[in-house]
Amino acid sequence: MCKNSKHCARSDSVAALPACNHHPICSPFPKSLHLISRSPHLISNRHTLHRHTPQQRPTAVRRARHSHASRRVTRRQVLGRLAAGIVVPSIVAPSALGAGLLAPPSERIVVGLIGIGAMGQGHLAHLLKYDDVQVAAVCDVDRWRRQNAQRTVEQTYAARTGDGGFRGCSAYNDFRELLGRDDIDAVLIATGDRWHAVTTVMAAQAGKDIYCEKPISLTVREAQAMVAAVQRYSRVFQGGFQQRSTPEFHRACQLVQQGAIGKVELVYVTFPGANGDVELPPEPVPDGLDWDLWLGPAPYRPYNQRFHPYGKPPRVVPWDFCRDFGGGNLASNAVHSFDIVQWALGMDDSGPVEVIPPETDQVPLLTYKYTGDVMLQVAPWRLDPQKHHIPKGWDPNTAISAFGAVYVGQHGWIHVGRQGFLTAYPADVLKQEDRSLARTHSVHDHHRNWLDCIRSRGRTASTVQSAARSTIVAHLGCVAHWTGRALRWDPQKMEFTGDQQASRWLWRPMREPWTL
């Protein structure tokens, strides 16, 4: 591992990476893949913490694990190669929490939380409110954050069970130790974007069901690897696209799909701009932060508090200043809008066929073209009548809703956003009956949908396939910005057409020892 340069010796730079035509994850959503870390550290599965025995697991979870017994042996072999040191958690009897306000062990889903930044803390608050969930482990490379999260979990359960001395949540620096525990049924991944693919694939191999924050990957090939792993190991996966579990977005997509505004010709979303790249001066790594593991598969960069402010309340970082760690506004924010556009247009198994950046002067905005003469444009907060198409009935002073979308059809438009925001022109559009959109899950609670599907082994609101497709839309926009030209995209082959330089961005080299 080279720490004297930005990139390790194995991969000098992304620009030097040749287009790949033979890698096992370079075909659309492949059936198999190779995995993963060649870490010298090993993980043992022989933990003494025992939340419930296999017989006490929720029945559906127990059956799902049993049906993949041979795969479980394989993943134990994989995990067995990963670690030598054992972190022994506190011992808690299976009935320790059953006497309080939690469900009995046989009805409880045991969850581990990986990543405790701003998003991770929000997820933790959600998980702690469910009686049929037990958060048994938290993990973060930041000691301050993981200790705070551990304290929150134990204080919450102590209050609910009346056991002031409750100690039943383990805190880990290395997520591989958490994955090595057989008593954990599922993991919620809220790490930085650079970690999503590696952690998800390893979790699938370890037999865990998965909730992964958006964007689910840093590249197209990572997204494909995630789909392959989830499918291969028959895992329940929920993407962090919670708007699929929100009534106003359900309603808007239903209206678009049933033709309430006629054929859709244009969709506006906001949060424009891919990220740039700046060099920050090195600073001392804080005691209590595992900087090497924080970086993970990303190219080496010296620590700077702008990357990770230690000992301070975490905040959401859009990575608009560092290309190695994310995709800027497009991948961090606009991706939520891309998801509901893909959903409304019926593109969960497909995507755009061309992307044009404003740098080309062909269009004033980042523009995606779909088959059927449909355009998606990433606009500023307010449309400019001098530059942009203003649909009939639209007030130019109106701001496009953050994380929402404006669907413009032949007979009107629909504007949807968070917190119940839904308007349309003409207003009668909203009076149409709910006819076409099949509701495959309960609306209102994205986490509850995931937990219910863990029990039923059913289809989640945000499947790994749809989450991958929506994330890829963001990736395409970033590549168009970075290359500065229009790009043709084949959504079935998952490759750019006739552009080798753009194709190099389909994959980013990973720093040793991490690989997919």
Image: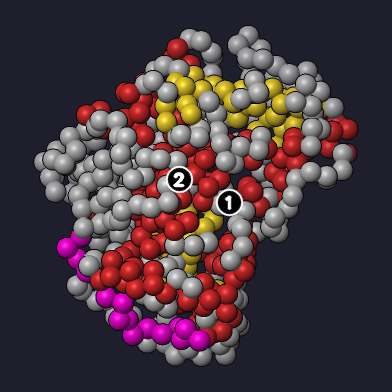
* Image location (x, y in percent) of residue 177: 31, 69
Q: Residue at 42% of width from left, 61% of height from top? A: 204
* Image location (x, y in percent) of residue 132: 59, 76
Q: Is residue 508 above or below residue 484?
A: below
Q: Is residue 167 above or below residue 436?
A: below
Describe residue 220's horizontal placement relative to residue 415 as left or right: left
Q: Is residue 434 above or below residue 131?
A: above
Whether the magenta-drawn stretch holds residue 383 is answered as no
Q: Main secondary structure of the magenta part?
A: loop
Q: Amino acid at mark 1?
A: Ser
Is there any visible trace of residue 203 in the rendered image? yes
Q: Nearer the viewer, mark 2 or mark 1?
A: 2
| Relative depth, front residue between 237 and 290 | 237
For label 2, the SS is loop
Q: Amino acid at mark 2?
A: Phe
Q: Residue at 42% of width from left, 68% of height from top? A: 207
The residue beneath circle 1 is 462
The residue beneath circle 2 is 29
* Image location (x, y in percent) of residue 344: 68, 37
